[in-house]
Amino acid sequence: MYLFLAFLLVPIVEIALFIQVGGLIGLWPTIGIVILTAVAGTWLMKVQGRAALAELSRSFSELRDPTAPLAHGAMILL
């Protein structure tokens, strides 16, 4: 039940904050900030994903347990 409420309330709060920020700084700066953070997040996920993939490959080549790099890679997506 709490998870359902979280999935319901978080987007509502996010939209309300977008409206308030848009009212304070204007529409175009708000859209710019959203786009900038999306680009930065995409770049960061790409860099971290490549590092996790390299670590996974390294663990396979060294015959180590790959569960830690796999878990790290999965957490990057969240």
Image (cartoon, rainbow, N blue to C red):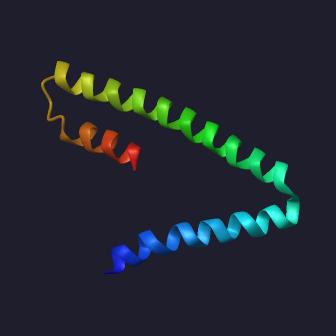
Q: Quadrant of residue 55?
A: top left
In the image, 20: left or right of 41? right
Residue 56, x across and y down, in percent: 26, 28
Is 28 or 55 nearer to us in this picture? 28
In the image, 45: left or right of 73? right
57 relative to 69, above or below = above
Q: In which quarter of the image is residue 76?
A: top left
Q: Which quadrant holds the N terminus? A: bottom left
Residue 46, x across and y down, in percent: 48, 30
Is 55 or 31 nearer to us in this picture? 31
> Going 61% across and 66% down the picture, which residue do you hit?
14
Q: In which quarter of the image is residue 52?
A: top left
Q: Residue furthest top?
A: 61
- How many numbered marks does the figure carry? 0
Is 70 or 26 nearer to us in this picture? 26
> Going 69% across and 68% down the picture, which residue do you hit?
17
